[in-house]
Amino acid sequence: MSTQDNITIPAELLPRDGRFGAGPSKVRPEQIQAIVDASQSVMGTSHRQAPVKNLVAELQAGLKELFQAPDDYEVILGLGGATAFWDMATFGLIRSKAQHLEFGEFGGKFAKATTKAPFLEDSTVISAQPGSRPVPQAEPGVDVYAWPHNETSTGVCVPVERVQGADDDALILIDATSGAGGLPVDITNVDVYYFSPQKNFASDGGLWCALFSPAALARVDEIAHSGRWIPDFLNLKTAVDNSRKHQTYNTPALATLITMNEQVKWMNANGGLEFTTARTRESAEQIYHWAEASDVATPFVAEPEDRSQVIATIDFIDEIDAGHIASILRANGVVDVEPYRKLGRNQLRIATFVAIEPTDVAQILQCIDYVIDQIR
Ligand SMILES: *Cc1c(COP(=O)(O)O)cnc(C)c1O
């Protein structure tokens, strides 16, 4: 096996855009142009005045349209990304006990946050091996069920469904950071569908957005008035009040709002979730079909119905070093297909987010074939 990285992939095999990372992920040129177009009207202006508030209002309406949310669902946003939202939810959405599904890095992190909270009962954590998925189980006294829609660290997705037999007022909280916009969802099955913008929304990080059901909004009110101490920055009631005024508690990155709004407008103009999910399905199926036909690669996720259509994880046989493939690709401008660092497998992880062209996915597969031929 060759070890040199100076393999030049023929230009005709290269994708037009070489960004296949799981986030920050490919930003479409039209989104950058939107920043340029707003370079004097929005950039550099107050987030408490009409130009930015109108932009936030447009983004909120666009997300409601994209997810076909009922009228009484609200789009709430704040700063700090999904990671901050875990702490906010711990303080402001869980009354006494949560149940988490843990089958990779991200589901596990939220579970840790609630388990450490001294004012909550110990959380129930239902785990499964990375590459597979657990199933939530109705449990008396659990008032929040939480799992990621798409476990970005492994490429496993879990359907968003109500938990049969759960307590009447139990809420479903879904971390949709890498799934939202790229996976099908019936939003009436979830009370809080939250996500950061740097995945399917092809924007920068730092923000969280969430669709809240009326039951979730009522829970926020209930806990805010319960006397529990909540740090101001992590107070969901404050986020709800500000979002209703198309504002955030503190200063947001305006460029992120612009690029995200542009992506949501593009998604809606092309047919909404039907368009986006057909596109991600087409991209991901190419990768899984390629891996199934390959004699050196296999899909990491064994069960076809658990395989994500926004993150494809592909294992390689021992004789082929996936890290070596990733570094040759990187040297040729095709970047960020290294596996999730803590998973530690001989694997490539390829994002198939909405912004990524299915034709470019076909190209990266040709690149990988070419590299394998060269290093074998
Ligand atoms: C990326 C990701 C996160 C972390 O998002 P931040 O914006 O970095 O906080 C959380 N959950 C999932 C499922 C993710 O993919």
Image: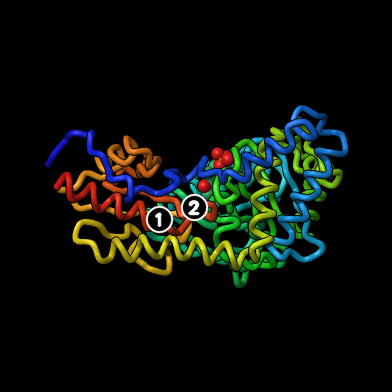
The foreground one among 76 and 371 is 371
Whether tag 1 and tag 2 are in contact, CB under 8 A, the answer is yes
* Amino acid identity at mark 1: Val
* In the displayed structure image, the side of residue 222 where residue 158 appears, left or right: left
Q: Is residue 136 at all visible to an observer of this figure?
A: yes
Q: Earlier in the sequence, mark 1 or mark 2?
A: 2
Q: Is residue 113 left or right of residue 53?
A: left
Horizontal arrangement in the rendering, residue 9 relative to residue 219 (left or right):
left
Q: How far from the left and from the top, in percent, is residue 283?
A: 44, 61
- Along the line of sight, which residue is nearer the eye, 175 or 179? 179
The number of discs equals 2
Q: What residue is shown at x 37% (from left), y 38% (from top)?
A: 333
* 357 w.r.t. 39: above or below: below
User: In the drawing, what numbered circle is on residue 356?
Assistant: 2
Res 114 seen here: no
The residue positioned 35% from the left and 47% from the top of the image is 14
Helix, strand or loop status at disc 1 = helix
Picture quadrant of residue 299: bottom left
Rendered residue at 43%/49% (across/down): 104
Q: Ligand 1: give its quadrant.
A: top right
Name the residue tied to disc 1.
Answer: 361
Q: Residue at x 40, y 52 (%)?
A: 154
Q: Is residue 184 above or below residue 318?
A: below
What percent of the width, then of the height, locates residue 62? Answer: 74, 55
Is label 2 in a helix, a strand or a loop? loop
In which quadrant will I find the N terminus? top left
Q: Work out whether residue 238 or residue 114 is closer to the camera in this orientation and state it.
A: 238
Residue that sits furthest to the left in the current view: 1
